[in-house]
Structure formats: structure tokens, C-alpha cells
Image (cartoon, helix red, strand yellow):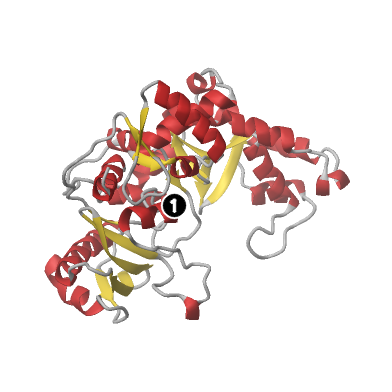
Amino acid sequence: MTPAQARRTAIAAQRLATAPRPAGGRLDQGHLRRLLQAIGLLQIDSVNVLARAHYLPVFSRLGPYPMDLLDRAAWPERPAHRTLLESWAHVASLIPMSSEPLLRWRLREWDERWDPNGGRLADHPGFVDEVLALIAERGPMSAGQIEKALEAPGRGRPGWWEWSLTKSVCERLFFAGVTAVATRQSFERHYDLRERVIPADVRALPSPDKTDAIRDLTALAAAHHGVGTAKDLADYYRVGVAETKRALAELGEAGVVTPVQVKGWTEPAYLHRDASLPRAVHGRALLCPFDPLIWERTRTERLFGVRYRIEIYVPEPKRVHGYYVFPLLVGDRIVGRFDLKADRRDSRLLVQASWLEPGADPGEAAEAAAAELRRMADWLGLADVDVRPRGDLAARVANAVPAAR
């Protein structure tokens, strides 16, 4: 394959090959279900300068949609209506319910590694049972609510990852598959017993062993990629590269994937049998930093010739492009990148920096950016797009935004 063929194949597999996306038409759970079957998962992240990460890839592919469409699929009032499940897949992710059995081996491994009487818990015998008994009695609860109800010991210190004893227990019960996330309120997990979160028909599905599950996850990853190296595919569901290579050998014998050489790639790639190989793609989208098309940064560089890094954790004086930067995909090229923030108080989409990618046409990039920024602002309910003067594309984008209405 040529690099351009591989790039277009990857874009098509991620449902970003066509435009325009539905606009003004009714989007329903069927659209969301088909999208999640195609891309496999939505990464969850706490950053909320624009919108939570799990909402953004859906917007990039389906266009303006009501966010409660996703909320009702992931955190419904009735478990029978749940079609998405919060799980540890790529990282913290929403996955189709049909993928749940394929990740049970990971729950088993966490359960086997966890000593419920070790560490800080050694000084608090029976505390895990108290937490479970409270959840069983009251239903979905946050760690903070549990801590307050039990007058729990060991409150955490302020700051990221400084979990209290209660939060640590809640997370470990979740990792081990004893509990599951029933809902989120103000982005905080509310835990319930797993059997009250996952529908009975899903719980009744057989649990494949680890080898079979990883083979099936690798097949899914290959379909989500269209074409990718073993390392690319392993990253999607965060399994080992050696295990992925063994799975690919079996999938190759079964005809699910075909080994291919992409010119310029140093490692062999694998093409999924159902992958589309379009001669051209016509999509246009702003891509969240946690979008599955670009989250594996070495693959992004290989596919698009663009070095992209998230700079959230970089001190501000050392940032190159900005805090929360969205690459702009037009056709099969990334043509620019934009540092975005929602100013909800003044109802503005702040474009804090606008950058042109080398070799991209500035007029085309500015026009496409203006249209996508206006579409995003409308979706978020923001009245204006405010383009700040930072970046080599800022002036052109600012001039193009008024016409994008």
C-alpha cells in the first residue's frame, strides 16, 4: 500500500471519510449504536475546557447531536436501556455492551492481584464489606457519599490521584468487576453492584478465556483501524504487543487480516478484510486530542506527517500550540490545529490560537476551520466564535468566520 492508501483506509475505518454529516436531521440511538460498533469505544477524560472528551468524537462524525443521546445510552435510569458500558478498555472508556465479555479477563486479573486486606486496608478490617453492604442497600453512590455515610477513615489530600481510602476501595471494586458505574453526576462516578448495572442477557453471555478474548479484541482493533501495525492494534484496547502478534497470526490464517507493507513504514501492517480502500475521502472534522484516529501519536505522525502532542501538562510558557488543541482534518490531510475553549459565561467559543500545517493551503484551511468552528459553537449553544490573534492562521480564520454563518 502507498501511504496515501493507508491514510484513506484509516480515515474510512473511523467513519470520517464523508461529508457533510447529518445536519438538522433526527439522530437516534441507531446512529450512535452503528458508530460505536465501527469505532469501538469513546475515551473518557476529565478535561472540560470545551466539552468532555467522550462527546467530541461523536460530534466529529455525526455532526450536531443532543448530548443526552449519549448519556441515555451510557447512564440510563433503567439498566435494560443501557447500550454502552463504562469500562477500562483503551483507558477509561465507553464501550458497546456487546464488547463487555471480551474484557472480563482484565477484571479477573485485577481481582486476583488485589488484596482487600492489604495496604491501608490492613488497619481497617471489614471496610470493603461495609462499602459493598452500603451500596447493596442504597443503590448507586459516589465515593464521597459513601465516605460521608460510613464516616470513613483516611480522607485524601487535595490534588490529583490523592485518593481517600474510600475512593481507593470504590475504584478497586470497579476494576475487579464487583461493581460498575451506574451513572455520573457532575462527572463523578456513582457505583452500584455489577448485576444491577449490566443487563441480564449480557451477563449471561459466556466469558471467553484471555487468549480468545485478545484475539477477538485484536480483530476489532483491526476493523477500527482499517490498516495498522501490531503496535497500533495493541494500543487500541491496551493489550500486549506480543499477545497481539500471536492473535494476528491466527487472524491471518483465518483470513480476517492480511499482512501488507506500507511504503515508508518500518514495521509490517495488517489490513482488515472488511476495510474500505477509497480512492478519495471528503470528510472534514475538528479532532479532539482523545479522538481514536489520532490518540496514538506515532501512528498519527506516520499517517499524516504531523507531530502532535497534547500540551495540557506542559507549563504554559513551554507550550507550542496551546492547552487543548484540535487538529483539523480536511479530506485526507491535517491542515491546521486550533486551541479551543468554551467561554460559557459570555457564550463564546474561544479560538485561542490558530495554526496552519506546513504545505496546507491557507485559504482552504481557514474556510474549513471557520465552518467547523461555527458548527461546533452552535452545537455547544455558544453564540459567537471569538478568534484570538495568536497563530499564523488566526487572521484568515477571523475573516472567514462571519461568512460561515
* Residue shown at the point (49%, 67%) measured from the top left: 312
Residue 362: x %, y % from top left = 18, 71
Q: Based on the displayed image, in which of its 4 quarters is residue 197 positioned? A: top right
Q: How many numbered discs sit on the rendered protein?
A: 1
Viewer-proximal residue among 369 and 1: 1
Quadrant placement of the C terminus: bottom left
Q: Based on the displayed image, in which of its 4 quarters is residue 125 positioned? A: top right
Quadrant placement of the N terminus: top left
Residue 170: x %, y % from top left = 67, 43
Q: Residue 157, can we see it?
A: yes
From the viewer's perspective, is 237 left or right of 124?
A: left
Q: Quick check: 77 above or below 21? A: above
Residue ID for mark 1: 296
**Label 1 Cα crowd, 10 Å radius (few <14 / some 14-19 / many 20+):** some
What is the three-letter code of the residue carrying label 1? Glu
* Residue shown at the point (12%, 69%) measured from the top left: 403
Q: Quick check: 240 above or below 160? A: above
From the viewer's perspective, is 26 left or right of 147?
A: left
Residue 26: x %, y % from top left = 21, 41
Viewer-proximal residue among 24 and 306: 306
Q: Secondary structure at mark 1?
A: loop
Q: Residue 75, can we see it?
A: no
* Residue shown at the point (69%, 46%) measured from the top left: 146
Viewer-proximal residue among 378 and 134: 378
Residue 342: x %, y % from top left = 36, 67
Q: Based on the displayed image, in which of its 4 quarters is residue 228 positioned? A: top left
Q: Quick check: 174 above or below 367? A: above
Q: Residue furthest right?
A: 123
